[in-house]
Image: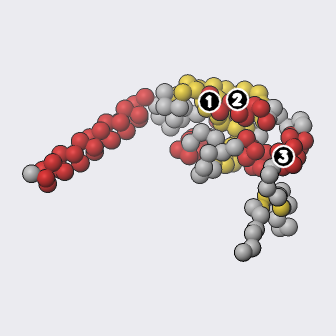
Amino acid sequence: MITLGCYAVTVAILAIQVGATATYSELMPPGRKGVPAVVDQLPAARILNAVNAELTLPLLGRDYRHYVTTYFRSPLPEDVIESKAEYVLLMRQQEADYSRVLTLSAVATDSSIVYGGITLWKVNRTGQLKTSERILQSSPYPVMTSPKYPSTLVPPVTSR
């Protein structure tokens, strides 16, 4: 009886997962997954994907011309400066946090059922160096740069 119950639960979970995947695939436009189509018309650029890793491939563009940075953690506004991104893809909930630190101008918006609203923003470079210096100076941690890659931040090493 226990085996039959476990089997029934497993079948139910698999059916729900297959149903959710099929629904998701039907709701999303093929290949775009909610990424604005204007990405295909932009010149080659660095784009920071601050939404989800599954959007990396559509962000590369139709002919894979873009360099896309995707973090395997929740990205911070400071990551835009560190990655030298020219564009950043944000969800509606992230826009306030990023616009406090960066000067952004909207390029295109796409309403995604899964992510709410997704907007591609252009990062305006004016005053960005001052912003990054302000962020580094306000950091409570000591900041070091790598001698090999001067623009790369290296976490401080502590000895025991």
Q: Nearer the viewer, residue 44 or 102?
A: 102
Cβ atoms under marks 2 and 1 closer than 8 Å: yes
Amino acid under label 1? Gln
The residue that disc 1 covers is 93
The residue that disc 3 covers is 138
- The image quadrant that residue 116 belongs to is top right
- The image quadrant that residue 145 belongs to is bottom right
- The image quadrant that residue 98 belongs to is top right
Amino acid under label 3? Ser
* Residue 96 marker: 2
Whether residue 12 sits left or right of residue 24 in the image: it is left
| Crowd band around label 1 with a 10 angstrom C-alpha radius: few (<14), some (14–19), many (20+) | few
Question: Is residue 36 in view from this perspective?
Answer: no
- Residue 105 % position (x, y): 77, 27
Q: Nearer the viewer, residue 143 or 153?
A: 143
147 lies above or below 136: below
Q: Quadrant of the C terminus?
A: bottom right
